[in-house]
Amino acid sequence: MRMNRLGRISDWNDDRGFGFVEPNDGGSTLFFHISALSGKHARRPVIGDTVSFDILRAQDGRLRAINVRVAGACIVEKAERRYVPKRASVLARLAVLVLMSLGAYLWLSGSLSFLLPGKTTYEPREQHFATESDSRPVAVRPVVSPFSCDGRRYCSQMRSREEAVFFVRNCPGTEMDGDGDGVPCERDSRW
């Protein structure tokens, strides 16, 4: 194998990425593949380019050009790239903050409690006003109920009077207390 021979590209198929080199000192043309180009060239080779190359006998016995370097074509060094994480835009951060705030508000207000099985509901209780003789604060404990607000609005959709009372007290949009006295389904004969 002879090193650093000179020649010119006599044929090049850019679509398939291979061509042939004609040595300056004579001899048969040598096949080369684009992968035989040493380094990353700024442009693809063209017919007539002057090249330097080495010769290698392949496993099939044929001679090939390797380490092909195009004269005058600049070789682009592969720049070392370091990972720089992308920063989220101000708008994206603001959107995330708004969604988190909305989620927290809905969670705390109980609007999302329908997502949880066996949810805990809070029934309104009579307010207890502390007197001079009663200086202890009164804690309101959550009441676990077998009922949950599920979108039903009418008396005909209720299974019991207790369920209707729960819906009137705790669920928005019910239409079971026609006269507004807090007693639901007064004309329902089932109870």
Image (cartoon, grey):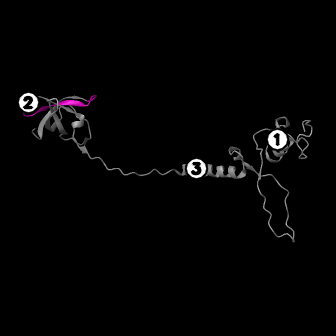
Task: Say whether marks 1 and 2 touch (CB < 8 Å).
Answer: no
Residue 127, horizontal then vertical, whole percent: 84, 59
Q: Is 112 in the magenta?
A: no
Q: Sequence-wise, which precedes: disc 1 or disc 2? A: 2
Q: CA distance from mark 1 to mark 2?
A: 97 Å
Foreground of the two, 97 or 162: 162
Q: Sequence-wise, which precedes: disc 2 or disc 3? A: 2
Could you tell me the amino acid type at mark 1?
Thr
Q: The C terminus is located in which quarter?
A: top right
List the residue tagged with mark 1: 174
Region rendered in magenta: 14-25
List the residue tagged with mark 2: 27
Q: Is residue 18 above or below residue 165?
A: above
Which marked residue is nearer to the observer: mark 1 or mark 2? 1
Q: Residues within 10 Å of mark 3 (few under 14, many from 20)?
A: few
Q: The N terminus is located in which quarter?
A: top left
Q: Residue furthest left?
A: 25
Q: CA distance from mark 2 to mark 3?
A: 70 Å
Residue drawn at point x = 12 percent, y = 37 percent? 6
Residue drawn at point x = 23 percent, y = 30 percent? 18
Q: Residues within 10 Å of mark 2 (few under 14, many from 20)?
A: few
Residue 89, horizontal then vertical, whole percent: 51, 50
Residue 131, horizontal then vertical, whole percent: 87, 68
